[in-house]
Image (cartoon, helix red, strand yellow):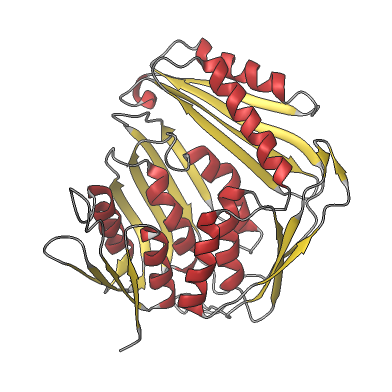
Amino acid sequence: MSKVLKYEGHNYFRQRLVLATLSGKVLKIDKIRSNDANPGLRDFEASFLRLLEKVTNGATIEISYTGTSIVYKPGVIVGGKVYHDCGTARAVGYFLEPLIALGPFSKNPMNITLNGITNDNVDISVDTIRTVLLPQLKKFGIEEGLELEIPSRGAPPNGGGKVIFRCPIVRVLKPIQFTDEGRIKRIRGVAYCTRVAPQFSNRMVDSARGVLDYVNDINIAAVHYQGDKSGLSPGFAISLLAKTTTSAFYSAELAGGPGQAPEDIGLLAAKQLLAEIQKGGCVDSISQTLVLLMMVLGPNDVSKVRVGELTPFTIQYLRDLQDFFGSQFKITQETGKDQTVLGAAPDTLLMTCVGVGYVNTNKKAT
């Protein structure tokens, strides 16, 4: 039996399950909220485990009587056509983000329908997944048939949204050399509203544009969803994306709630985007973990990427990557020399690693 990796606590729950699934290592997590008034797994965590069972074959999950301990023995990622109701405790992004990491290494291409909340301020929105995370996969050679469809929106608290995720499979990934962040070329985005006045979308767009007017090419779509496409609760949100001359992406997003003005949401999201751009690098905060994982799973070749400041989440992710795959990154700090549109260029980090040569044995070599 392979070595059991042991962790404590509920933090980093999804990422450790994903890394265990990819590496084939047995995972044990103890003391899950053991000191909490309501100890053990939450419903959404149990729901994620059920989703993991649906996309794999042969996995075994043992949960202790109190729900504070779990042993996970991974199976084979089989993918295929799956339907999952995500509930309303966490948004669809909570469930979709891990699937993006597993999808390329599945036995069959994934075709997964998820129901629930599409945009909130807790989990990554489906818009940012579609416009930022999926294009990151393309840099590693995962392209044909990779898409995320959003037939209907679902705002909190009742959700009612629906997304369909399709992911092709690959045998091996390509290494990447992505060290030139380029200059901001265009800004794209979508501002949507459901079950509120259609003007909400336009008001978010106008206030965001007012902050971002130093870029000539700005196109933020204002969409008002009606009928079946509008979910079960009123809501509005904006997702912004800045793209550079070298296809680096920076993103920001914000959802509005009762009593909030759409102008404030548009303004804050635009300021968040500028803050993200100011950090520099070729990969924004939200994409760091996915890109670093794909570098580790790449061929026995050197991959390099320039990033801005590492998030605390990413720092822990690097430790977990080492636990599961034995991989190490060489991190070189580089002082910004160039002038950006926002003033002096920031210090960035050059992340270098040699891939472990991960092969999707489910996919026949052609």
Residue in the image at 35% along x and 45% along y: 114
As drawn, the residue found furthest toward the bottom would be: 1
The image quadrant of residue 365 is bottom right
Residue in the image at 40% along x and 66% along y: 16
Q: Quadrant of the N terminus?
A: bottom left
As drawn, the residue found furthest toward the front would be: 35
State whether residue 143 appears in this view.
no
Q: In the rendered view, would you say 292 is above or below 134?
A: below
Q: In the rendered view, would you say 183 is above or below 309?
A: above
Q: In this view, does 91 lie to the left or right of 139?
A: left
The image quadrant of residue 116 is top left
Q: Quadrant of the C terminus?
A: bottom right
Marker count (numbered): 0
Question: Where in the figure is residue 166, as x and y percent of width and height?
Answer: 46, 52
Question: Where in the figure is residue 57, as x and y percent of width and height?
Answer: 29, 71
Q: In this view, does 345 lie to the left or right of 12?
A: right
Q: In the rendered view, would you say 191 is above or below 335?
A: above
As drawn, the residue found furthest toward the right would be: 338
Q: Is residue 177 left or right of residue 363?
A: right
Question: Where in the figure is residue 150, as x and y percent of width and height?
Answer: 45, 37
Q: In this view, does 143 lie to the left or right of 317?
A: right
State whether residue 96 appears in this view.
yes
Viewer-proximal residue among 53 and 80 = 53
Residue in the image at 43% along x and 42% along y: 123
Residue in the image at 65% along x and 37% along y: 241
